[in-house]
Amino acid sequence: MNRRNFFAGAATAVAATTVSRVSMAALPEPVTQGSTATAPPLAPPNGRPYNPVVTLNGWTLPWRMNAGVKEFHLVAEPVVREMAPGFKVNMWGYNGQSPGPTIEAVEGDRVRIYVTNKLPEHTTVHWHGQRLPNGMDGVGGITQPHIPPGKTFVYEFTARRPGTFMYHPHADEMVQMAMGMMGFWVTHPKESHPLIEPVQRDFCFLLGSFDVEPGSATPKVNTMTDFNIWSFNSRVFPGIDTLNVRKGDRVRIRVGNLTMTNHPIHIHGHEFEVTGTDGGPVPRTARWPEVSVDVAVGQMRQMEFIADEEGDWSLHCHKAHHTMGPMGHEVPTMIGVDHKGVAEKIKKLVPDYMVMGDKGMADMGGMEMPLPDNTMPMMTGAGPFGSAEMGGMFTLLKVRRDQKPGDYKDPGWFKHPAGTVAREVPGAAVPPAARNAPPPISNTDATVRKPSGAHNH
Ligand SMILES: [Cu+2]
């Protein structure tokens, strides 16, 4: 039995493990989200007021107020997450999605979180960064027994520290996090805080990495570093919503990293300051301007700036391989290789062979090649000027003067004022080639690599 069959079988088996209605009766009704769209901010219906966050391609978990305690219900379960239109992956997550819903509370809130396990194996939830009683820390075997399949455990503590936190299993972590189990937690300050500025837009998302063979639908859970899918909240460009703001807004973007490598997150057109980490707000004397910030493994970075330049500004991981979709990393560099004649000969043997990358790989963005059933192009996304040649951890910060306060709708492409777009210089001569250029390569050995075939990872 291969791994994929194993997980498919396990998912079927767990459907039979239902939680008894009697034991569920006392619990808050679990809320499930079916959509991958960015949900509007959830205004708090009760409790202390706060300015809610917006989770990119995600949502906030509603709660029930019970004698002054905020009660949440997380359900750990197999989910199908559409990572980009038409590209669906079997993951494990919470309440219908991966990542799980964002949990929002206010400093000083008493919170009670029920966790029902519908996975085929045991789990726990660790509340990354929180001050809490040791027995609520969620480390299976160390601070609590694991939550067996079909059972519900309850966690209860006071959200003592305002800031941004994460949650994830501390049980069979390699598998459960590779399958997508993680979520955000935001504790808002209870009153005006000297180091926490009010903002007009407050976004959050988690960085993700998956290894899904083209044509398959379940992540390989033993992969340590060679992932092929890089995501913001388990979505990949062009499936990631844009961050739409009004010109002049103070914007906060909270980014958490539960992948196996660091991600330098880069924003175009603006400078920002890191105003907080999962350790809390950064003292003002320790802030400096940046346009990229490295988010290391197990860290959260909170970027803040005034969005005062109109336009469609790229926001992406600066590791170039992380803004691309699935490909075999063993593809050789072909720049400068003369394929003339070779391709024709190979095509007689392999009809859908195509020459790739002899002038760089930008061609891949516009290339229509046959893809296996369940995957996505390596680089894609059409912009107003052509192919964006991007995939993975990439989206846009859209700044508009006429975006209404509180309106998160995509305003469409930026309309550039006349004369403000880089343009061709008509009639300019091509300069001569550099002197001492190496001679053209000849007598090249060619290897047949079928780009549409299964990759040889
Ligand atoms: Cu990255």
Image (tube, helix red, strand yellow):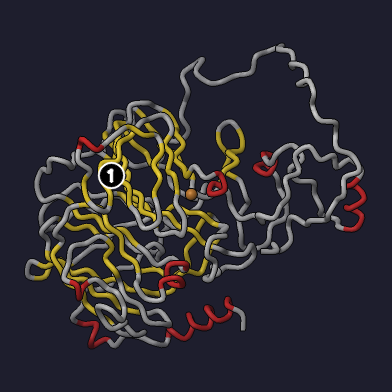
| Residue located 11% across and 68% down the image | 69
Q: For this rendering, which residue is in front, 273 or 3?
A: 273
59 left or right of 378 in image = left
**What percent of the width, then of the height, locates residue 147?**
31, 82
Mark 1 CB within 8 Å of ligand 1: no
Relative to 407, is 215 on the left or the right? Answer: right
Q: How many callouts does the rendering have? A: 1
Q: Quadrant of residue 153?
A: bottom left
272 versus 259 height, above or below: above
Assign a secondary structure to mark 1: strand
Q: Which residue is mark 1?
A: 202
Residue 30 x %, y %: 28, 72
Is the C terminus in the top left, top right, bottom left or bottom right quadrant?
A: bottom right
From the viewer's perspective, is 269 left or right of 392?
left
Image side of residue 452 versus residue 115, left or right: right
Residue type of the residue flagged with mark 1: Asp
Look at the picture and state if 62 lies above or below 343. below
Rendered image quadrant of residue 307: top left
Please identify the residue farthest to the left as the structure is shown: 67
Crowding at dot 1, Cα within 10 Å, few <14 / some 14-19 / many 20+, comes out as: many
Residue 450 falls in which quadrant of the image? bottom right
Measured as percent of width and height from the top left, residue 70 is found at 15, 66
Residue shown at the point (55%, 63%) measured from the top left: 211
Q: Is residue 9 above or below residue 128?
A: below
Q: Residue at x 15, y 61 (%)?
A: 159
Residue drawn at 71 percent across, 48 percent down = 368
Q: Quadrant of the N terminus?
A: bottom right
Q: Nearer the viewer, residue 256 or 44?
A: 256
Across and down, in percent, residue 384 comes to 55, 32
